[in-house]
Image (tube, rainbow, N blue to C red):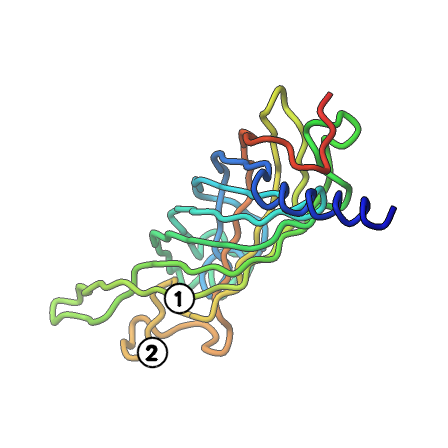
Amino acid sequence: MKKIFFFIAFICITTTSNAQINEIGIIAGGSNYIGDIGSEYYINPNSFMGGVIYKWNVNPRVALRGTFTFTQLTADDANATNNERKLRGIHFNNSLKELAVGLEFNYFEYNLDDFRKTKTPYLLIEIAAFNYKTITNQNSDSSYEYGTNTSFAIPFGIGYKTKLFGDFALALEIRARYTFVDDIDYNNNEITALTFGNPNSNDWYMFSGFSLVYSFGRPPCYATPY
């Protein structure tokens, strides 16, 4: 009996390794920045966010995932709740591209092939690299010279996903990004006109939206087709 058990377990592991269910799709929604300019609300989408997503389901509770997201972060002191910011009147726009990889932990078992397990809330833990514009120098005519920088962020988030129809699933999620930089808003301590805010507080940005994914690949050994 033990030999049979270990044989079945071995087959299950090897089958899972070679035949995981894959998911690929699109992401869309809104983004917002949190820092030294504009609104101080953490969830306040004010710009379009889009991208692509891929998932590899390790088992019904865990998925490895990768996302590529692009957005235009924007903020304006006119939208602040702080009177000092409103009087200051600074605003900015910055393009941002992000590549993130991590784990998706399902609260319940998730399996599109089992009608009893087609919806669940989930948690996200990721690591991300992002590229954005910076201001490198101020010219004599007060115009600026721009460059780009790549840095890292610690992303985390929550979501809820459910089967839509057939092999398609829909998820709603909120993803927060804590960065290790303070110049997404073009803050620059070497340029007087761009020295503002708290130099000890790094920038954040948020993604709020949905993903639409298509599942493909043979069901792994834990799935029982219906």
What kind of residue is marked 2? Asn
Q: Position of residue 129 (x, y in %)?
A: 42, 60
Q: Say whether residue 154 is left or right of residue 1.
A: left
- Residue at mark 1 to residue at mark 2: CA–CA distance: 18 Å
Q: Quadrant of residue 49?
A: top left
**Which residue lies at the image location 48% right of the left edge and 54% below the top edge?**
100
Please identify, in this view, whether the residue under mark 1 or under mark 2 is nearer the observer: 1
Q: Position of residue 206 (x, y in %)?
A: 53, 52
**Which residue lies at the image location 44% right of the left edge and 43% below the top edge?**
47
Residue 189: give its label. 2
**Which residue lies at the image location 76% right of the left edge and 25% below the top edge?**
115
Q: Say whether residue 23 is left or right of residue 92.
A: right
What kind of residue is marked 1? Ser
SS at circle 2? loop
Question: Can you say which quadrant of the picture contains the C terminus?
Answer: top right
Q: Say whether residue 164 is left or right of residue 138.
A: right
**Which residue lies at the image location 70% right of the left edge and 34% below the top edge?**
111
Q: Say whether residue 66 is left or right of residue 184.
A: right
Mark 1 or mark 2, earlier in chain:
1
Q: Is residue 179 above or below residue 169?
A: below
The residue closer to the viewer here, 42 or 53, is 53
SS at circle 1? strand
Q: Position of residue 220 (x, y in %)?
A: 65, 37
Which residue is under mark 1? 151
